Image (spheres, rainbow, N blue to C red):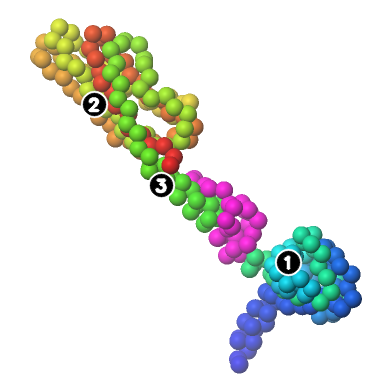
């Protein structure tokens, strides 16, 4: 094997180690002693390495077998590890492995950006829908899945408004996407008038359209309005409509989706 090959293997070997608890070791959830590690430098494994119990010698399969805990201190002269407490005592003759942090799943929502595991994340990372520089692939994947799920339940509300005051078409507390607005006036020969529409997302007025549909009685003409949207709301949606003439009915439609 060439020099480069040996260097690569040497580095890989430092990512994980295998050891056995000493015969006669006192049972402990936090202090594990193994002569296999006598001679390593003090503190060599502190914080950046983790311990997993891979074999519970006197009760195979029982806790703490398969549990993983961070190493907080190491004494090389005795091969003694101090770890974050396991769920049950580690005992003599138990087997364990030492894992470098780069091959262990990070804590939830960690902002570290050093190892591949940091970038990938863990199953409990919170969903993220806004692109940034500190979140994991898992967080963005959840955010995308959630965004797509919002479009699975479609709603359409149609309200006929004949008033010069603003009236609710939709007024909900929920999360989803406003996808479209339309307004069709009923033709009234004796009067002219226009319909208006406005919508509010998460408590903030987004837009008011003062002439969204219109009737011209003298020419016997009605003009409808239609608007395609893709506006997400996270807490609330309100759509309102009104007319300039109370004798003209404006049929207003709001189309939106909510979380599945």
Give the distance between the C-alpha atoms of the residues marked 2 and 3, in whole angstroms: 28 Å
**Counting other residues with Cα less than 10 Å from the Cα at mark 3, is it few (<14), some (14-19), or many (20 or more)?**
few
Q: Is 123 a magenta residue?
A: yes
Residue stretch rendered in magenta on the structure: 105-131
**Counting other residues with Cα less than 10 Å from the Cα at mark 1, is it few (<14), some (14-19), or many (20 or more)?**
few
Q: Nearer the viewer, mark 1 or mark 3?
A: 1
Marking on residue 148: 3
Q: Quadrant of the N terminus?
A: bottom right
Residue 207 in view in this figure: yes
Marking on residue 225: 2
Q: Residue at x 64, y 87 (%)?
A: 6
Horizontally, is 209 left or right of 172 in the view?
left
Residue at numbered disc 1: 62
Mark 2 or mark 3: which comes first in sequence?
A: 3
The reply to whether dot 1 and dot 2 touch (C-beta < 8 Å) is no
Callout 3: SS: helix
User: Which x, y percent locates residue 55?
Assistant: 73, 74
Horizontally, is 140 left or right of 7 in the view?
left
């Amino acid at each position: 094997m060439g020099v480069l090959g040996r260097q690569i293997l040497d580095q890989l070997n430092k990512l994980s180690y295998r050891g056995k608890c000493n015969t006669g070791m006192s049972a402990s959830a936090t202090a594990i002693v193994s002569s296999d590690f006598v001679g390593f430098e003090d503190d060599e494994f502190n914080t950046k390495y983790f311990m997993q119990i891979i074999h519970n010698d006197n009760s195979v399969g029982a806790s703490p077998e398969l549990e993983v805990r961070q190493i907080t201190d190491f004494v090389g002269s005795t091969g003694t590890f101090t770890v974050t407490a396991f769920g049950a005592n580690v005992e003599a003759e138990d087997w364990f492995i030492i894992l470098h942090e780069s091959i262990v799943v990070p804590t939830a929502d960690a902002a570290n950006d050093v190892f591949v595991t940091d970038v990938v994340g863990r199953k409990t990372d919170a969903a993220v829908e806004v692109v940034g520089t500190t979140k994991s692939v898992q967080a963005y994947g959840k955010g995308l899945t959630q965004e797509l799920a919002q479009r699975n339940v479609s709603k359409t509300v149609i309200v006929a408004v004949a008033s010069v005051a603003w009236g609710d078409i939709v007024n909900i507390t929920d999360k989803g996407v406003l996808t479209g607005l339309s307004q069709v006036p009923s033709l009234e020969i004796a009067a002219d008038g226009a319909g208006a529409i406005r919508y509010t997302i998460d408590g903030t007025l987004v837009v008011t359209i003062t002439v969204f549909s219109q009737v011209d009685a003298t020419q016997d003409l009605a003009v409808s309005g239609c608007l395609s949207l893709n506006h997400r709301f996270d807490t609330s949606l309100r759509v309102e409509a009104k007319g300039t003439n109370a004798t003209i009915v404006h049929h207003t439609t709001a189309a939106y989706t909510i979380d599945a």
